[in-house]
Amino acid sequence: MILFRLPNKWPALLGSFSLMTLLVSFVLAQKPAGRAEDAPSSASDAYRIRSGDKLSIKFLYHPELSEPGVVVRPDGLITLPMVDEVSAKGLTVSELKASVEKAYSEALLNPVVSVNLVEFVAPRVYVGGQVTRPGGYELRAGETLMKAIILAGGFTREANRKMVLHARPVEGGKLKLTTFDVMRMLSDSVAAQEVLLQDGDYVFVPDSKLPKMPRILNAFERRFRA
């Protein structure tokens, strides 16, 4: 596995996510696809609040402050009475509850708050490059790399099937890129498991005329600048 950082500063990726650097890992063809280090968390993990989610925030002893349907703004904040803004994006419901209670602790005596998720933005994955219908798709329908490509209409004639990129946001404002040889994955001689995707992942199919990784990365970068 090779890790390096690109010097370029990239624009916003998938909404408000900003890329400051790119962390790239190359998975050799001999390595089974199902062993990628960035496998998604189990379904039992707590949901992380996203921009666009609608929340219900109720105060036990101060119902006049309750908000039955506050929407998380694109910047990840919510607006509440008395304390104005509280950061919600990326927190679990229990973490937001603790944050709200802390924000009101200076104005109220032992505030007791309940937070509930009323509506949420469906998790999505994004497919681009040499596919028939590039765009965003619900994760539930495209939960694996191959399913996402099929949802996007499959490969075009110009697709480089041996160097498909899987991009995933990671901590520190970075993007981790893993390459997969889909032709090898589909081979009967290889018992490789499917690549599981998670919310915000991006699948990029480069042009077959770009056989070398530096040119593929440049094409990937230009895709996000478009």
Image (spheres, rainbow, N blue to C red):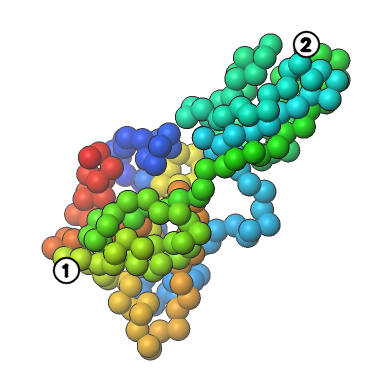
x 84%, y 25%: residue: 60
Q: Outermost residue toward the left? A: 209
Which residue matches tag 2? 107
Residue 29: in sight, yes or no?
A: yes
Is 91 on the left-hand or right-hand side of 139? right
Residue tagged 1: 157
Three-letter code for the amino acid on which mark 2 is drawn: Ala
Number of marks drawn: 2
User: Mark 1: which secondary structure?
Assistant: loop
Q: Nearer the viewer, residue 88 or 122?
A: 122
- 181 or 105: which is nearer to us? 105
- Quadrant of the drawing holding the N terminus: bottom left
Which residue is outermost to the bottom?
Answer: 189
Where residue 36 sits: x, y (%)? 48, 65
Task: Please give the name of the residue rendered at 63% of the width and 29% of the height, measured from the top-left corner.
Answer: 69
**Vertical comparison of 197 with 97: above or below:** below
Residue 102 at x, y = what percent?
75, 22
Residue 148 placement (x, y as % from top left): 39, 62
Pointer 2 or 1: first along the chain: 2
C-alpha separation, residue under disc 2 versus residue under disc 1: 63 Å
Query: In the rendered view, would you say 19 is above or below 141?
Result: above
Residue ID at (45%, 83%): 191
Are there few (<14), some (14-19), or many (20+) residues within 10 Å of tag 1?
few
Which one is nearer the viewer's eye here, 219 or 22? 219
Q: Are marks 2 and 1 in contact (CB under 8 Å)?
A: no
Rendered residue at 18%/61% (across/down): 207
Dot 2 alpha-carbon crowd within 10 angstroms: few under 14, some 14 to 19, many 20 or more: few
Q: Amino acid at mark 1?
A: Arg
Residue 19 visible to the viewer: no
Q: Position of residue 50 (x, y in %)?
A: 54, 38
Q: Secondary structure at mark 2?
A: loop
